[in-house]
Image: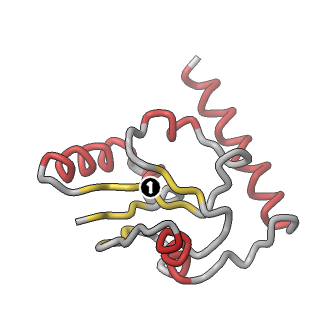
Amino acid sequence: MRIALDFDKTYNIAPEFWDTFINISQESGHEVILATYRHKEYDWDPLLDNLDIPMYFTDGKAKKPFLEELGIVVDIWIDDNPYSITDDSAWLPDSPELHAWRVENQKRIDQEQMKRN
């Protein structure tokens, strides 16, 4: 089976849990991939550095058709927002909502890095 795992409000909420899930899935012969609405360059999160699975950044495009255009068929989707699988994001690339999210996300990342140091 090919399993697509979401990042925001899924993997990033409990990375240790999902790392265990990924390892068990792979040991059982399944493929786990990351499928996220994020933009690879603008929305990178340090947690992604630890993932050793294929990652697909759709930049707000619906995940299922995006992956299918690449010839990737997913058997199981794990996503807190099922609409992101079939629908494009309501936030356009230049939208104030996306800009505000990116600012807040960077603040969160900076705070987490300060805690680690």
Q: Is residue 13 above or below residue 65?
A: above
Residue behind mark 1: 34
Q: How is the image coloured?
A: secondary structure
Q: Quadrant of the N terminus?
A: bottom left
Q: Quadrant of residue 92?
A: bottom right
Residue 108 picture location, percent across and down: 66, 42
Q: Nearer the viewer, residue 55 or 108?
A: 55
Horizontal arrangement in the rendering, residue 105 relative to residue 77 (left or right)? right
In this figure, what is the number of numbered marks?
Answer: 1
Residue 89 picture location, percent across and down: 67, 75
Horizontal arrangement in the rendering, residue 97 relative to residue 20 (left or right)? right
Q: Residue at x 22, y 44 (%)?
A: 23
Q: Residues within 10 Å of mark 1 (few under 14, many from 20)?
A: many
Q: Amino acid at mark 1?
A: Leu
Which secondary structure, mark 1? Answer: strand
Q: Residue at x 20, y 57 (%)?
A: 30
Q: Is residue 91 above or below residue 100?
A: below
Q: Residue lying at the far top in this picture: please name it.
A: 117
Horizontal arrangement in the rendering, residue 113 relative to residue 22 (left or right)? right
Q: Residue at x 68, y 48 (%)?
A: 43
Q: Quadrant of residue 73?
A: bottom left
Q: Residue at x 60, y 41 (%)?
A: 45
Q: Is residue 44 above or below residue 80?
A: above
Residue 117 picture location, percent across and down: 59, 16
Residue 76 picture location, percent across and down: 30, 72
